[in-house]
Amino acid sequence: MNSSPRFFSASEAARRLGVSAKALRLYEQRGLVTPHRTAAGWRTYGASEMARAAEVIALRALGISLAQVARVLGGDAKSLEPALAAHQATLEERIRELAGMAEKVRKIRADLTRGQAPEPGDLACLLAPANEFSVAFGLPWPWGGELFELTEVRRLNYITGPLGSGKTRLALLLAEMLPNAAFLGLERLADGGAAAQARLAADAALKSRVDQAIDWLVDEGAARSDTLTALLVGLEAPGPAILVVDLVEKGLDQPTQEVLIAHLRRPRGACVRPLFLLTRSSAILDLAAMEPDEAIIFCPANHSPPMRVAPYPGAPGYEAVASCLASPEVRARTEGVIAWRPAAVGP
């Protein structure tokens, strides 16, 4: 009987742990997990490394930063308190939501006992979350009156497309047509984000939320800046039920963009505000990292109606979406460049 310890390759370890190999490499870079190396230099993970990685993943699921993970694993248990408090609030919100659904079921059953059939929509509401929105409207120029229907709003909704495809116009329409929605435009960057700074000075609660978010982002590797602060003020401020954000990556470097989207994916409770993010950055819209509560709305170059695109190779529209995304470095080099075709010169 072979009793030698079993070791897993990086890809197999990632599969068993339910994360990407990229995540494991990040944990290694931060000194949280140290895999063994074969004679050829390949990473391998034994039982202790797998257990350690599982602890990191569990802590990350609570929404805490990698720097906080390091402190907790280093013996600073107090660092867990804010994350556990937030996780408890999320669980309690889910309990309230389930209690509400159970009450709806009880009422329908009571009505059935009295011989009363459910009203139209009563059964559907048992499956639909309380914050689900839908909208349908005719698309103006350049789409020529085509009907656009959005029957499901996910937690994160990406709007993308090539230059001149009308994606900004669609974003503005969604902010206008969706119930209790608002548009967070690039005016947030005016005068170095002066309006955002004024809001922070006038609202201590908002300043506290923004400061906490920035601390988390910087811990994860983001660069502190007025641009990031202005964006977070718009994201953290109370108000509309849905927020549509114009060019979320504007003015942010690649590490900050990568950390920002991780921040937006953090657990935030059942009543999280859906976001529509206008983007052409592959760091924001990473097709390989999309989660089930995220969606892509793609505006084709030929002004066909905007379409939902599934994030996997072979899906209709997938290659078109992939081709219009670029890394932050490339986006910075080509910002403001508009494709054009010179007029034909006669003989």
Image (spheres, rainbow, N blue to C red):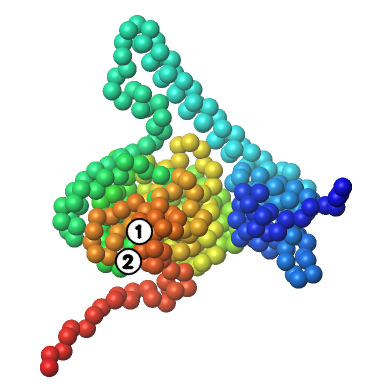
Q: For numbered disc 1, what is the local secondary structure?
A: loop
- Residue at 28% across, 55% down: 306
Which of the two discs, 1 and 2, labels the residue nearer the N terminus? 2
Q: For numbered disc 2, what is the local secondary structure?
A: loop
Q: Residue 46: x and y, percent? A: 78, 54
Q: Residue 159: x and y, percent? A: 35, 56
- Residue at 45% across, 55% down: 312
- In the figure, residue 165 lies in which quadrant? bottom left
* Vertical side of 61 occupied by 245: above or below: below
- Residue that badge 1 annotates: 317
Q: Amino acid at mark 2?
A: Pro
Frontmost of labels 1 and 2 is: 1
Mark 2, other Cα within 10 Å: few <14 / some 14–19 / many ≥20? some
- Residue at 70% across, 47% down: 54
- In the figure, residue 318 lies in which quadrant? bottom left
Left or right side of 260 for 221: right
Left or right side of 46 for 289: left
- Residue that badge 2 annotates: 162
Q: Residue 57: x and y, percent? A: 65, 48
Q: Residue 130: x and y, percent? A: 40, 32
